[in-house]
Image: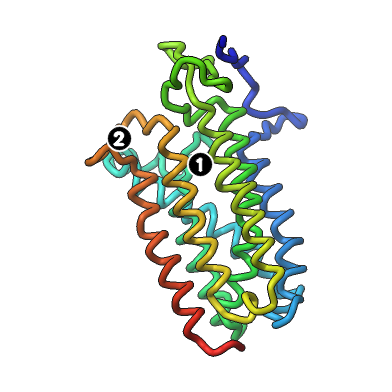
Amino acid sequence: MNPIILPVFPKGFYIGPVFIHYYALAYITGLLIGWRLVRYMVSRPPVAATGEQVDDFLTWAVLGVILGGRTGYVLFYQPVYFFTHPLAIPRVWDGGMSFHGGFLGVTVAILAFCWKHRLNPLRFADRISVAVPIGLFLGRCANFINGELWGRPAPAGFPLAMVYPGDPYQLPRYPSELIEASLEGIVLLCVMLLCARSTAIRSRPGMLSGIFVLGYGVARITGECFREPDPFLGFLPFGTTMGQLLSIPMVIAGFALILYARRRRVS
């Protein structure tokens, strides 16, 4: 079976003199759709916050995603380069965001916001976690359109093997962005929505957050098996990738949160 030859997709479009990147559009769309879903989720019993508080948190979430995502990329992926080229650190439009960094950034934002407004941080995080896979799905779709984060070479006969236009070797590869979009986005969103329907699960602070953190860790570790590692890092010890190593603590933390929530009294 012949591989799919991908065309060169534009990375965005102009609105007047302003160039809008699809990756930025994915972030904005994910935040807006997620905001509406979280607004609905916090109102379901037990109530976690008001709709107005969710509106206020949107700005905190944007800052957490951007600052955390960029800081994580700088520290986890290319610290030597950025420490020797510090003026490149704020150039987010050149690419380079880390989900794990963004996750930590939003976690800090949730803790600070809930402390300020005297909310239960675990219960508030539970409602937010339901919406996160939407942004993950859109982000991976943007990666695919941009022709970045290629998959590893696919075996002969793999039906969805794709040849990326920027690949100097022109090898048939796994569509790793679409695989990750399916696992981190569609599958994880379905799991979160299904679990969020249960009043018993919603009533245990930390349960939904634990399910998300565990689910993302497993999905990312699995998806990385089909993704070519970053060329400036390559494979790490035992054939792992940086994405997999950063996801192992998430699996552990997810299990811990679920156990913590199970042992707490239902509230």
Placement of 205 over or under 186, stated as above or below: below
Q: Residue furthest left?
A: 237
Residue at x-position 46% and y-position 28%: 151
Frontmost of labels 1 and 2 is 2
User: What kind of residue is marked 2?
Assistant: Leu
Give the CA distance from mark 1 to mark 2. 20 Å
Q: Where does the image place residue 95, in percent across and percent down from the top left?
A: 50, 36
* Quarter of the N terminus within the rendering: top right
Residue to which mark 2 is pinned: 233
* Image location (x, y in percent) of residue 243: 39, 45
Q: Residue at x 27, y 41 (%)?
A: 80
Which residue is tagged 1? 92
Which of the 4 image quarters holds residue 116? Answer: bottom right
Is 267 in front, or is 229?
A: 267
Front residue of 131/89: it is 131
In the displayed structure, 254 sits above or below 112; it is above
Mark 1 vs 2, N-terminal side: 1
Q: What label sits on residue 114 in the rendered view?
A: none
Q: What residue type is labelled 1?
A: Val
- Per the image, label 1 sits on a secondary structure element best described as helix
Please state if 151 lies on the left or on the right of 185 as rendered: left
- Seen in the picture, residue 217 relative to 165 is either above or below; the reply is below
